[in-house]
Amino acid sequence: MCAGTSANDGRKPVRSGRIRKLLLLRLKRNTYIKVPLTTIILLLMLSIPLSACSASEHSADWSVTGRAAPDQAAVNGGVGVMREAEMFTPVAWVNGEPVAYGEFKTRMLELRGEAVAEAAEKGADPAARNFWASDIGGRTPLDLLKEKTLHLLVRVKVQEIAARKAGIVQDIGYEAFLSRLDAENRLRSSRLRSGEPIYGPQQYSERTYFRYMLANLELALRERLARDEGDSSGKLLDEGRYGAWLEGEAAKAEVRVNPALYGRLSAD
């Protein structure tokens, strides 16, 4: 769910209290893969009527043959307006796969509450003006937030890399993810204008679509891993064994950070 290497000029993203457009991706409509069992399970989880959805209609699958350079897009995840160079500059690499600034920053904002709560348990005062720079046992709440974000994205990336290796997905870059989000939202807008029914939200936010795609990816991987173990019934690998596989992959992953960009990340 995930990246260019151009450097940014050090300017901070423009803050905004409202959802603003970041990129407008102009791409051909996605190609799709069919994962009947996993799609059925996920749709049941999301309480979406199965009869109204089909694999050929739904652009939430991962198969994308290429990546186009975006101009602006609606990414409603909390990241302020930033230049394209900033959006896709790697903050880190997991087994050589880049983690884009836009992806890292969006996940950071989602984990703020969790980091605040944990830092407060360690004695930091969330109401203090210097909260993010306060000391909690040799590190700061900001350090904690960045560590939590990296921990999450390492696990996301090893799943995406495994999915690409298995042929479930072709492009796991963050730019490709945003292109799928844009294509899905364009399709939904078109159906609304023509009076066709849609199921689920009228438009996906970056955060909602990220979670949907990751859940779908996990289901596809669990089915593939079960098949690799000799189970051709279509059943999923159980959650315990999948969790153990994921932790093992994450533990042996090679993780590098971009010191210049990682060091400039803020909690805002």
Image (cartoon, rainbow, N blue to C red):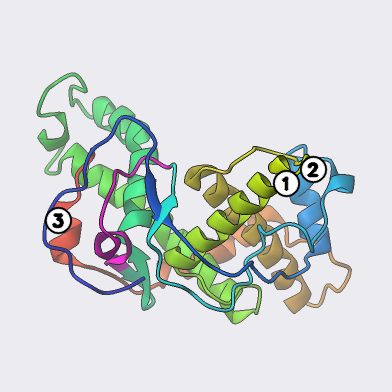
Q: Is residue 83 magenta?
A: yes
Which residue type does callout 2 highlight? Glu
Q: Which residue is mark 1?
A: 191
- Quadrant location of residue 4? bottom left
Q: Say which residue appears at 39% left-offset and 36% top-offset.
A: 19
Q: Of all residues shown, which one is farthest toward the front?
A: 194
| 48 and 126: which is toward the camera | 48
Q: Is residue 89 magenta?
A: yes
Q: Which residues are magenta?
A: 77-92
| 267 and 201: which is toward the camera | 201
Which residue type does callout 1 highlight? Arg
Q: Say which residue appears at 40% left-offset and 72% top-offset.
A: 253
Crowding at dot 2, Cα within 10 Å, few <14 / some 14-19 / many 20+, comes out as few
Q: Could you tell me residue 109's position as x and y percent?
A: 34, 40
Q: Which of the labelled discs sits on residue 263, or is there none?
A: 3
Q: Could you tell me residue 230's position as x and y percent?
A: 81, 78
Mark 2 touching mark 1, by CB under 8 A?
yes
Q: Say which residue appears at 40% left-offset and 65% top-offset.
A: 70
Q: Secondary structure at mark 2?
A: loop
Q: Earlier in the sequence, mark 2 or mark 1?
A: 1
Marks 3, 2: nearer the viewer: 2
Query: In the rendered view of the protein, which quadrant contains the C terminus?
Result: top left
> Considering only vertical position in the picture, is 85 above or below 149?
below
Crowding at dot 1, Cα within 10 Å, few <14 / some 14-19 / many 20+, comes out as some
Q: Is residue 51 left or right of residue 125?
A: right
Q: Which residue is mark 2?
A: 196
